[in-house]
Amino acid sequence: MKRYRWKVLVPDEELSAKLSRDINVSMPIARALCNRGIAGFEEAREFFRPNLDRLPSPFLFRDMKKAVDRVCKAVETGEKILIYGDYDVDGTTGTALLYLFFQSLGAEVAYYINDRFSEGYGLSEEGVSHAAEMKTSLVVTVDCGIKAGHEIKLLAAKGIEVIVCDHHEPEKPPLAYAILNPKVPDCRYPFRELCGCSVALKLVHAFCEFTGKPPETWQQYVDLVAIATAADMVPLEKENRIYMHKGIELLQKKPRAGIQELLALMGVEPGTLGTGHIAFGIAPRINAAGRMHTARKAVEWLIAGSKDEARGHAAELDRLNRERRQIDTEMLKSAETMVEGHFASFCSSIVLYHEEWHLGVLGIVASRLQDKYYLPTVIMGGREGGVKGSVRSVQGLNICDVLQQCSGFLERFGGHDAAAGITLKPENIPGFRKQFDRICAEKLSIEQRQRELQIDSFLSLEDVTGKFLNVLKQFGPFGQGNREPLFQSSNLRLSGLPRLLQGKHVKFAVKDVTGKIHDVIAFGREDIYRELERGSRRMFSMVYALEENEWNGRKSTQLKLKDMGFEEEPGE
């Protein structure tokens, strides 16, 4: 019945006990905090009370003063400014952020975003030509540019200066006028894991600080940074957690016209919005614009000046997302039929190709197959102009290191530890598939082939109180780098009969040795339904998160099951 490896984290017990006393929380809460590197009163205060006033100075960025001076000059002299953004959520939100801010200053500003299919990622020669035709004198990039040495030289030759706002790892930084990237050499900014949109916000923050504008001038854009942060899978710790916390507050209390219209189409009240609504609702609709048509539509939606305009753009994003869902559902079915045959020859990875697969949804299908089979996955499509592929990894395996060892078969590749994109010639697919699987087989340990659940503490059901749940809520927003706290309880028995909901979710109740009863929901775990029926009298252990459930106006605590396993009976 167990689907995962269970790993109980063991923080220093004396440190946990001291923290428990200092901030007046239970030991399971204190252990969960210590597991997140929070061991003292001040650290706990900063964790539970995120505050924009605690952000590091934006002038710690290398080249920030230079960038601010250049923007001031462009605004004062009426130069044409072009915002050059990437086509994903991070790039489009950052583009909208800078566009709205420069527009509020009265600057002459426009934006440009590559076509995903004809231009690809990063600055393009088409974009360079566009900037020249517009008689632009300053380009500000968002979520791209750090690897655009050639294109930045072309811009410089046309008398156009470039400020790069990016967060990707630099290989050889380009000769731009200014580079704002926490990962470049000699940058003194203390937090490296910002997304591209938040780097753009740091430029706005610095400009406002330098020109004496009130903090509200730049803080009004943290909602856009929250959307980008959730979508770009940067770790939700330190500065990113502050942006998420304050950004969600702004989205709940004062959503922009476009966001309010999109939430209405999603059936979500702004006051109830959380990280999940961003990651699985807003972000896919933004990405659908670039995947199915043009990412400009997402920017138009974000900068819409009237409610009617915002409603029209929101409806278009929603339509494109429905179209995208239909295509990726069909592609997933097609890919699933190929998996079994693939496993006959390769057992450490999934590498599939069909020339008619839609290039805009390769990453979605790769993510879904990786989630189901938990193996490094490559999904490829196209032929003319080169085969394109999206790559997804498993925990602990740096996929760029794997691709580096396959580079002889690739024309281009790039990305992060967990996800990447590739381009290769059709005739190199068999060699790449074989090499990729061989390298994955060498690097993947037995443990890495099974997903791990990190458990914060053992917990008795009688300790699950209203106060306990209220403190747990403050651990959010949850996401990569700030996972939801998980607990393990043992010696549990089924109370009543389990119910199967919608053919895939299981609802049941458990009781412990004290007789304490709690409701449990197991999303997507239809596999445990028959097991519970057959072993209804047996004791079992569970790993779960806690949440507040509301039904017909009544609130109750619910255990959100992650995994379970029957305990051995005497004589087994």
Image (cartoon, grey):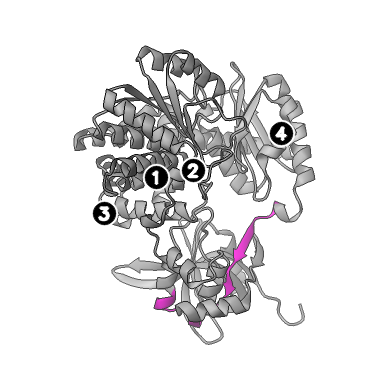
- Amino acid at pointer 1: Val
Q: Is residue 527 left or right of residue 206?
A: right
Residue type at tag 4: Gln
User: Along the line of sight, which residue is nearer the eye, 501 or 368?
Assistant: 368
Q: Is residue 25 visible?
A: no
Sequence-earlier tag: 1 or 2: 1
What segment is highlighted magenta in the picture? 449-468
Q: Which mark is residue 404?
A: 4
x then y, percent, for residue 293: 41, 26
Q: Is 459 contained in the magenta span?
A: yes
Instruction: Using the numbered discs, state the Cα–Cα distance from disc 1 to disc 4 in whole angstroms.
Output: 32 Å
Tell me: 269 left or right of 468: left
Image quadrant assignment for residue 486: bottom right
Please say if 182 is above or below 14: above
Secondary structure of the residue carrying numbered label 3? helix
Judged by depth in the image, the label closer to the viewer, 1 or 3, is 1
Residue type, numbered disc 2 = Asp
Furthest residue to the bottom? 514
Residue under label 2: 232
